[in-house]
Image: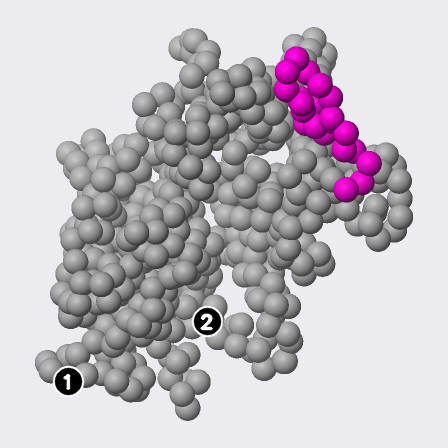
C-alpha cells in the first residue's frame, strides 16, 4: 500500500512538477500570477488532439507542431498583452486580472471548438506499459516522470551555467537593477515565455495522453503547479521541483485517508496552511539582508 | 412581463452582491475572489433551514448571518496575512474549498443533486407568492444596500478603510489597528452577500453547488471591475451591464451552449479591456 502511495506520488508529482517549474520560471522574470499559463497547457493538448484526429497527422509530428504552437501562444500573449501593460506601469494585480480575462476567453474558445466532454489522446499509440520492479506503469507516465526529471536537470544547468540563465537570475534578483546596467529585460521575458510555453505544452499533452482533457483542465493544472511551486519555495527551481512531489504525496495521502473527492480540498488546505505558517516554502533559501 | 420581472430580480440580486464585494475590493483594496462562497453558504442556510428544519425565511436569514459571520471572521483572519495578488489566490483557494464542501458533504447539502422546494418568504404574515411582490422586496433591499454602502463610504470607518487601501503601513503608523478594520469589513461584506444568497435561494426555489463556484466569484469581480471600484453607482451600473449583455445574445437566437460560451468570451474580453484602458472601471474611484 505504501509503495503504491510512493509510486502515485512519483507519477502525479512529475506532472505537477512540469507546471510548477514553468510557473516558477515565468514568475522569476515576470512576478505576477499569470493564469494564462494554464491555458497554454490546455492549448498544447487540444492542438495535438486536433492535428491527430481531424487532420490525420501522425502523433510525433503533431506533438512537435503543438509544442511550437504553445510556444507561439505564450510568446504572443507576452508581446501583445502583458508587455504593453507592463510598459504602462500596470501593477501585479492589474496583470493578474487581465490574465484572468485572457484565460476565460481561451477556455470558452476551447469549449466552443471541442465541446465540454472529456476527450483523450490515449487511444493513439502511446499505450503499452513498462514493468518496473513489481508495479506496472503505463508508458505515458514513464515518459512524464523521465521528462520531468530531464527538464529539471536541464533547466538547473541552464540557469546556473549559461549567460542567458545568469541574466534570468539577475532579473529575478532585481529587475530595476538589471535594467539600469543595460540589460534588455523585455527580450529576456519573451525568451522565458517561449521556454515556459514549451514546458507547459508538453505537460498538457502528457496529461491529454494520461488522464484525458477537458476545457477547464488548464485552470486545475496551473493551480496544482502553482501550489507546488509556492509550498516548495519560490526562491529556487529545486523548490518548485520538490514542492510538486510534496503536494502530490500529501494529496495522495489525503485521498487514501479520506476519499478521492476531497483531493482538491486537501491540496488547498495544505497550500493555505503553508502560506500562513511558512510563506517562504519548505525548502526556503537563506535570505540575506 | 414575467421575463422582465425575472430579469429585474436577478439584477437586484447581483447589484447587492456587487455592492457587498465592492466594500472589500473597492473600498479596502483587498482583491477577494471568495464572495461566491459566502453567497452560497447564505443560500444553503436558507435552503436547509426552510426544507429540513422547517424554519421561516427570516429565521434562516439569521441562521445564515450567524454561520457566515463566524466563518468570515476566521477566513478574514487567515486572509489578513496576505496582500495584493497573494490575497487573490488564497481567497480563490478558500472559495474552491467551500465549493468542495457544498458538493461533497452530502448528508447536509444533498451533494450535486441540490435542494428542491425552497419556498418564498412571508412578510408580516403576507405570503409573497407572486414574482412581482418578490421584486418589490428585492428593490427595497437594493435601495437599503445602496444607502448602507454610502453610509459606510461617508463614515470615518469608511475613510479609514480607504486609507488602508492607499497605504496600509502609513495608516498603521497613525495608530489604527488595520487588521481589525480589514477583518470587520470582510465580515460585513460576507454577511451581506449571505443574506442575498438566502433571497436568491428563496426566489429560485432550487439550488445546487454549481451556482457557487469560483467562477461566480470571478463574475462578481468582473461586475465591479467594469462598473467601477469603490463606487456604489459603479456596482449597480456593472450589474446592469453584465446581466443585460447575455440577454442580447439570447435575442440573436444562438443555441444555448454557444451563447453561454460567447458570454464567457465577452466577460473575459471586458476584463482585459478594462485592465488595459481603465483599470478603475467606468465609475471607479480606485485604481489597482
- Res B111 visible: yes
Task: Judge whether B149 appears above or below B103 on screen.
Answer: below
- Res B88 visible: no
User: Could you say which disc has been placed on residue B126 in the image?
Assistant: 1
Is disc 1 placed on a helix, strand or loop? strand
Q: Position of residue B147 (x, y in %)?
A: 21, 68
Q: Mark 1 Cα within 10 Å, few/some/many (few <14, many 20+)?
A: few
* Residue drawn at (29%, 62%) of the image: B43
User: Could you say which disc has been placed on residue B243 in the image?
Assistant: 2
* Residue drawn at (64%, 16%) of the image: A134
Q: Is residue B220 left or right of residue B134?
A: right
Q: Position of residue A99 (x, y in %)?
A: 56, 46
Q: Nearer the viewer, residue A159 or B254?
A: B254
Q: Which residues are magenta?
A: A123-145
Is disc 2 placed on a helix, strand or loop? helix
Residue that sits furthest to the bottom in the current view: B1
CB within 8 Å, label 2 to label 1:
no
Q: Nearer the viewer, residue A189 or B135?
A: B135
Residue A136 located within the stretch drawn in magenta: yes
* Residue drawn at (47%, 68%) of the image: B242
Cα distance, mark 2 to mark 1?
A: 30 Å
Question: For the N terminus of chain B, which image quadrant?
Answer: bottom left
Amino acid at each position: 500500500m505504501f509503495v503504491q502511495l510512493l509510486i502515485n506520488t512519483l507519477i502525479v508529482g512529475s506532472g505537477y512538477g512540469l507546471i510548477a517549474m514553468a510557473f516558477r520560471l515565468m514568475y522569476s522574470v515576470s512576478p505576477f500570477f499569470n493564469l494564462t499559463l494554464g491555458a497554454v497547457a490546455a492549448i498544447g493538448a487540444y492542438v495535438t488532439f486536433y492535428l491527430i484526429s481531424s487532420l490525420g497527422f501522425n502523433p510525433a509530428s503533431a506533438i512537435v507542431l503543438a509544442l511550437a504552437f504553445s510556444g507561439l501562444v505564450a510568446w504572443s500573449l507576452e508581446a501583445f498583452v502583458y508587455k504593453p501593460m507592463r510598459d504602462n506601469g500596470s501593477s501585479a494585480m492589474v496583470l493578474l486580472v487581465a490574465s484572468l480575462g485572457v484565460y476565460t476567453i481561451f477556455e470558452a474558445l476551447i469549449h466552443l471548438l471541442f465541446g465540454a466532454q472529456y476527450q483523450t489522446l490515449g487511444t493513439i499509440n502511446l499505450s503499452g506499459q513498462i514493468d518496473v520492479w513489481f508495479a506496472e506503469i503505463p508508458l505515458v507516465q514513464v515518459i512524464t516522470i523521465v521528462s520531468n526529471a530531464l527538464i529539471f536537470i536541464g533547466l538547473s544547468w541552464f540557469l546556473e551555467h549559461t549567460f542567458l540563465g545568469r541574466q534570468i537570475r539577475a532579473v529575478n534578483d532585481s529587475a530595476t537593477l538589471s535594467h539600469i546596467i543595460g540589460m534588455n529585460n523585455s527580450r529576456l521575458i519573451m525568451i522565458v515565455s517561449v521556454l515556459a510555453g514549451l514546458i507547459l505544452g508538453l505537460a498538457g499533452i502528457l496529461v491529454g495522453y494520461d488522464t484525458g482533457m477537458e476545457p477547464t483542465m488548464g485552470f486545475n493544472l496551473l493551480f496544482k503547479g502553482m501550489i507546488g511551486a509556492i509550498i516548495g519555495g519560490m526562491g529556487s527551481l529545486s523548490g518548485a521541483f520538490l514542492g510538486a512531489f510534496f503536494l502530490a504525496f500529501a494529496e495522495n495521502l489525503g485521498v487514501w485517508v479520506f476519499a478521492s473527492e476531497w483531493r482538491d480540498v486537501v491540496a488547498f488546505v495544505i497550500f493555505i496552511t503553508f502560506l500562513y505558517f511558512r510563506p517562504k516554502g519548505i525548502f526556503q533559501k537563506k535570505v540575506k539582508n | 412581463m414575467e421575463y422582465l420581472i425575472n430579469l429585474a430580480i436577478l439584477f437586484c440580486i447581483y447589484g447587492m452582491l456587487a455592492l457587498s464585494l465592492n466594500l472589500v475590493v473597492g473600498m479596502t483594496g483587498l482583491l477577494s475572489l471568495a464572495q461566491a462562497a459566502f453567497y452560497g453558504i447564505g443560500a444553503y442556510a436558507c435552503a436547509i433551514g426552510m426544507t429540513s428544519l422547517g424554519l421561516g425565511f427570516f429565521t434562516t436569514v439569521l441562521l445564515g448571518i450567524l454561520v457566515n459571520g463566524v466563518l468570515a471572521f476566521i477566513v478574514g483572519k487567515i486572509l489578513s496575512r496576505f496582500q495584493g495578488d497573494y490575497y487573490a489566490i488564497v481567497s480563490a483557494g478558500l472559495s474552491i474549498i467551500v465549493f468542495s464542501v457544498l458538493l461533497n458533504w452530502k448528508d447536509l447539502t444533498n451533494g450535486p443533486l441540490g435542494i428542491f422546494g425552497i419556498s418564498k418568504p412571508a412578510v408580516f404574515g403576507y405570503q409573497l407568492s407572486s414574482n412581482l411582490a418578490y421584486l418589490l422586496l428585492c428593490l427595497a433591499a437594493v435601495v437599503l444596500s445602496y444607502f448602507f454602502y454610502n453610509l459606510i463610504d461617508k463614515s470615518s470607518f469608511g475613510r479609514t478603510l480607504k486609507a488602508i487601501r492607499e497605504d496600509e503601513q502609513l495608516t498603521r503608523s497613525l495608530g489604527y489597528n488595520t487588521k481589525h478594520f480589514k477583518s470587520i469589513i470582510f465580515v460585513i461584506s460576507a454577511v451581506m452577500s449571505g443574506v442575498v444568497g438566502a433571497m436568491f435561494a428563496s426566489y429560485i426555489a432550487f439550488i445546487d453547488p454549481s451556482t457557487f463556484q469560483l467562477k461566480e466569484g470571478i463574475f462578481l469581480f468582473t461586475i465591479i471591475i467594469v462598473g467601477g471600484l469603490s463606487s456604489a453607482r459603479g456596482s449597480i451600473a456593472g450589474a446592469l451591464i453584465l446581466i443585460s449583455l447575455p440577454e442580447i445574445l439570447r435575442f440573436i437566437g444562438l443555441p444555448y451552449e454557444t451563447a453561454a460560451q460567447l458570454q464567457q468570451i465577452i466577460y473575459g474580453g471586458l476584463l482585459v479591456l478594462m485592465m488595459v484602458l481603465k483599470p478603475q472601471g467606468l465609475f471607479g474611484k480606485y485604481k489597482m
